[in-house]
Image: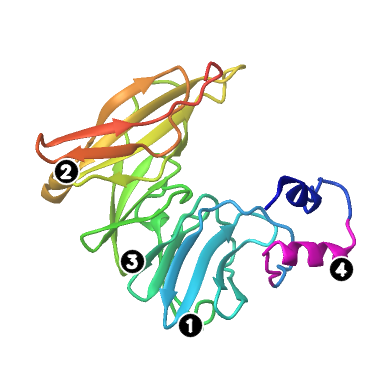
Amino acid sequence: VPKDVLLETVIALKVGESYPIEPLTARLTAAGYVRCQQVEGVGQFASPITAAEYNGHAYLYFGVYDGDSAYYQYDLTAKSLTAFRPEGSGFYEAGAAIVGENVVFGSESGKLYSRPMGDGFASAPGASLDLHEICQDAGAVRSCIRCRGGKLYLTTESGFLWRVESDLSGASFVRLKSEVDGPYAFGGCSSPVISESGRVYASVFRTDWTAADGAYESAVQAVSLSRWDSGGVSADTLWTSGEGVAQAAPVVYYDAAAGQDYVYFTVKSSSG
C-alpha cells in the first residue's frame, strides 16, 4: 500500500472524545475489524487471552477484572459472546488452560473454575475449587495455569505455588520463600514456568507498605517436582534483591546434554 494512501486511512481515537458511531463503524470494518456484541458494563480487561478449537468452532477466553466482572467465551466462528459470572469474583491476570473439553481459570476470590467449552460454558454444571479451604492465606489467583503430567500449576498473589488435580478434586502448595524478616506483605507472583528438567520457576516480590517510599524484596525461585512427589519440597532461591522487582515470568532454556537450566528474567526498576 502506498504511504499516502495508508496515511489517508489512519484514524486516531482519543480518550474523552466522542465519535459518530456509523462512520466510525464503517471505517473500522473497512480496516478489517469485526464489531462484537457489547458487554453490559465498563470493565478492565486484565487477563491473557487463551485460544482453543472445539467441535469445529474457534474460541477465545479472557477475563474482566471490575465493572462487568466476568470470564468470557468468544466464539470466533459464530461471532457470539458468552459470559460466566460467579458471585463475588473478578478476574485479573488469570490466564486459562484448556484441559480436555474444559477451560480452567482462577479468580480474585481464590477459586478455580472448570467450565465446558461451547454451548454450556455459562450454564452447564462445572467443577470449582476454593483454594482458601486448603490454605486460608491463599490469596487471589493472578496467574496463567500450566499443565504437566495431568496436573495444573499456578501461583496465588500471597506467595504460593500450587499443584492442582486436573478435575479440581484436590491441591497441594509450596510457600515461596522470603529472605527478609520484617513488616512485609506479599505483592505478587509471576505465572509459573515448567522446565523439561522437572523444575518449576516463578518470580515473587514483597512490598513494605509501612515504608514512606516503599521497599521491595524480589526473588526468582525454583521448586523440584521430584522432591514435591516425595513430600520434601521447598523453594530454592536463584536470585534475590532489594533493588527492583522481578515481576514477569522467567524464560527457561533447558540444555538436555548438560542437564542444565538457563533462567532469564527482567527486573523492573527506576534505573531500567
Give the residue pinned by disc 1.
124
Residue 49 colored in magenta in the image: no
Q: Circle 1 sits in a helix, a strand or a loop, which is it?
A: loop
Q: Residues within 10 Å of mark 2 (few under 14, many from 20)?
A: some
Q: CA distance from mark 4 to mark 2?
A: 55 Å
Residue type for callout 1: Ala
Residue type for callout 2: Ser
Q: CA distance from mark 1 to mark 4?
A: 37 Å
Q: CA distance from mark 3 to mark 2?
A: 25 Å
Residue 30 vs 262, above or below: the answer is below
Residue 194 vs residue 77, the one in the foreground: 77
Residue 26 colored in magenta in the image: yes
Q: CA distance from mark 1 to mark 3?
A: 16 Å
Residue type for callout 3: Leu
Give the residue pinned by disc 3.
168
Query: Which image quadrant is residue 64 in?
Result: bottom right
Whichever of labels 1 and 2 marks the residue nearer the N terminus, that label is: 1
Whichever of labels 4 and 2 marks the residue nearer the N terminus, that label is: 4
Which label sits in the foreground, 1 or 2?
Answer: 2
Residue type for callout 4: Glu
Q: Residues within 10 Å of mark 4 (few under 14, many from 20)?
A: few
Which label sits in the foreground, 3 or 4?
Answer: 4
Whichever of labels 1 and 3 marks the residue nearer the N terminus, that label is: 1
- Identify the residue at image location x=73%, y=68%: 40
